[in-house]
Image (cartoon, grey):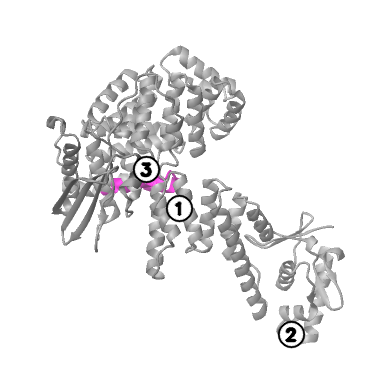
Amino acid sequence: MSTIRVMLLPSLKIEVDGTTVSLRGAKNRAFVVFLAFKAGRPVQREHLAQLLWPDSEPARARASLRQSLTQLRKAFGEDLLRTTSDAVEIPEAAIWTDVGQLADDLEEGKATREMLVKLQCLPDLFADIDSVGQEFGDWLQETRGRVQADLLERTERLVSGDSLGAQDRLALARAAITLDDLNEVAIRAQIIALAELNDHSAALRAYNQFYARIEDELGVEPSPETQQVAVRIKLMEAADDVPARMPAASVAPPAPLTLVAVLPFQRLGPSSLPDYAVLGMLEVITCKMASFPAPAVISSNSTRHYLDAAPSTAQVHRDLGANYVLTGTIQTRDRMALLTLQLCDCVTGHVRWAATREIRVARLFEAGLDLAEDIARTLELSLNAAELERSRGLPDDHLEPNHLVLQAKDRMFRLALPEFSEAKDLLDRALQRGPNFAPAHALAAEWHAINVWQGWSENLGRSRVALEEHARKAIYLAPNNGRAMAQWGHHLIALERDFDGALSLFERALQLCPNDSEALIWTVPTLAHSGQAQRAVENGKKAFVLSPCDPFVFRNEHFLSLAHYASGDYAEAAALGLSCFRRAPAYGSNLRVTIASLMAGDRSGEARELAQHHNLAEPGFSVGKFRNAMGFRDAAQQAAYVNNLLAAGVTA
């Protein structure tokens, strides 16, 4: 038997055996759609005549129905349209609809791009089907609501389960939210998926927006289940695999770090203090503490998501491995801010240090530097006071550029082109208002670096020039900024292959910031390429400890994968590389190191599959074109790396 295929999304299209059927007249199209939703059930002629020709006399309406049936039989054939003197029916086996198929696919646990498009189009279901009367219009509205509710319920079940990966669940949840932007099941699924994808700040942002909206519009709070998800996001889930796979080092392990987690301060009472001001203070305290030899401070990349959350010290210890947690509150009135602070032992819960400060709001960032020094003295009384640089923070006239930089950094972390472009605009504004503001130049250099490694740059030559200009300017303006110095050392290899110059910069950077995760991670590729693989592994591991839930965890995995490849641990290199691939499948540099690791580890089948993906992802790449720019300083190691790529099938 032939089949009538009725596509309703995004617009009406009717086919029979693959051939498009063009029906003339709005009522003929309405007739087919109505029968499609009544498939397998006879519909009385009297009802059809009244439904489709409500303004005609009964006899005239019946005549119009007969004429319409004649046209439909001609289009579909007698077998597909059964009629009696009293009723009309399309056999259930003879009809297929895309919304019915969508329901079946959701029930089977599928999640394809076509399904997402159709889900997002559901509010426009029947939009191109003219209402031929009040009763038919009511039927369209009721059917649209019923179909949407059914598909939404199926989507809720799917995103609440574990049969799909986080990326698919996130996409489906977002599609469901377009149908019902207060659907708590979908919003909760979105939060969980974002957390699993290591985008914790976005997860908490979605929760906070939902909380504020339902409290404002409905006067209620999220369900206890949703609140528990928000508070108990397992930050270590995305990064747990990495430490677990790491083999014991061949040298004696270093002494365990004393780790401090600085959390965003809680705003109490009425406050006009924006998020970026609270996050800015977090950044200042964290970066200042990272410049001390001890204690080590967990990266603000991994603590910023706690904004507007209130985790227990035990929870932070479980999430981040912190020994101590600095918490605080801010109350503002007029132009003054009252800060209360507590430094707590995560294991015992005892308060090790507490303080209150009353300061002008305009001097919050400067106060953060003083607080960082107090905390360091409390935990490590043996610190040499001379090692504590007493820079007194940013001048007030630099606060506005700093706010722009913080907002740009937040957008860069999302690794999506629209937000990434917005970040560039924010950085341009920051540099226009503060042309000598070193953090803006450092972040601008990183922006151009990401633009290159993501393959988004439309002019590589111009991007490299801009990268060099901003990196050099950042070093010139802040000669004691270890993070910027390490970043410039990394870029120096890409631009000039100046190994000695880069290694010298790294030594100085780590003297200045021995416990800064970003400074450490930037050293890893050059150390791996220059014959210092063991040190590269150690620095990469330490960076993971200091920022276990970094938004750029995929980059850190790639760098550490390269270090393991250089050390000869091909299994670990491949494991980290494949984890990075799952997070960032188009990251070309990681693809190549992972392919080489698989080949070197006698996993040629997997290597060849990944090489095919690489060649599709980077059609402009060839080994011959880029081999001189590839990293290893040792000729034999470089030759082995190139041979592994060629053997796997990377474009020669």
Quadrant of the snapshot with the N terminus: bottom right
List the residue tagged with mark 1: 191
List the residue tagged with mark 3: 318
The percent coordinates of residue 305 (x first, y second) are 35, 48
Q: CA distance from mark 2 to mark 1?
A: 54 Å
Q: Is residue 38 above or below residue 589?
A: below
Is 417 in the magenta? yes
Instruction: Specify which label sits upstream in the sequence, 3 or 2.
Output: 2
Q: What number is the disc on residue 56?
A: 2
Quadrant of the snapshot with the C terminus: top right
Instruction: Specify which label sits upstream in the sequence, 2 or 1.
Output: 2
Q: Label 1: how many residues lie within 10 Å, few (<14), some (14-19) or many (20+)?
A: many
Of residues 459 and 495, the one nearer the viewer is 495
The percent coordinates of residue 44 (x first, y second) are 79, 78
Question: Which residue is depicted at the point 16% across and 49% down?
Answer: 355
Of residues 250 and 574, the one nearer the viewer is 250
Residue 494 visible in the current orientation: no
Numbered range of the magenta stretch? 403-422
Q: CA distance from mark 3 to mark 2?
A: 73 Å
Q: Is residue 49 above or below residue 351?
A: below
Secondary structure beneath label 3: helix
Residue type at tag 2:
Ser
Secondary structure beneath label 2: loop
Q: Nearer the viewer, mark 3 or mark 1?
A: 3
* Predominant secondary structure, magenta span: helix
Of residues 259 and 508, the one nearer the viewer is 259
